Amino acid sequence: MPDLDFMVTADYVRAEGGMLHMIAAGVDTLLVSSVPAARPLGVGLRLLIDVAEARQQHQVELIYQDADGQRLAEVSGTIGPVAPDQPLPPPGRPFGIPVAFNLMLPIPGYGDYSLELFVDGEPKKSITLAAVQLEVPGAPGHA
């Protein structure tokens, strides 16, 4: 079973050449001027796969939900198998695979939301995101 090395939220994420490229990493607050709204979010993660499992296919699923567990968006895909001609590390050393997701998150109201990561159906990570009102200086009701 693949292990999660890390999972990070960002404005945008790209996986290329065995690396993750991120812009504005560490997002945990979604600033919106009004609701309902939508906001783009990138999620970068790195999975560690044992050499024995590298030649198998693995399912990755990311679920975005509200505080009550209602699914608002989801994205899924597969990683692997590693190509037969691609060299693998020696047994005992994991094979790292970067994965990037970019999605548009619906924000029906202010409050807490979560991103849930599943790999091969097993929960691996949960990140809480807070949707808060963007305070605009000079707007009515703001100093």
Image (spheres, rainbow, N blue to C red):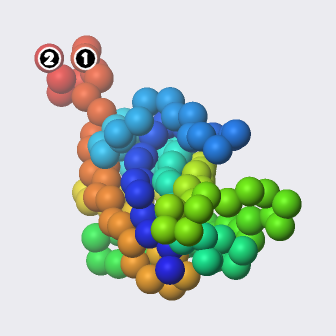
Q: Is residue 61 visible?
A: yes
Mark 1, residue position: 137
Labelled pair 2, 1 in contact (Cβ < 8 Å): yes
Q: Amino acid at mark 2?
A: Ala
**Residue at (51%, 85%) from the top-left corner?**
121
Mark 2, residue position: 143
Going by the image, does 19 lie left or right of 38? Answer: right
Q: Where residue 59 sits: x, y (%)?
A: 62, 76
- The total of numbered circles placed on residues is 2
Q: Secondary structure at mark 1?
A: loop
Give the CA distance from mark 2 to mark 1.
6 Å
Q: Where residue 124 sits: x, y (%)?
A: 39, 72
Residue 28, located in which quarter of the rendered image? top left
Q: Where residue 4 sits: x, y (%)?
A: 43, 64
Q: Residues within 10 Å of mark 1 (few under 14, many from 20)?
A: few
- Tell which circle, 2 or 1, labels the residue nearer the N-terminal end: 1
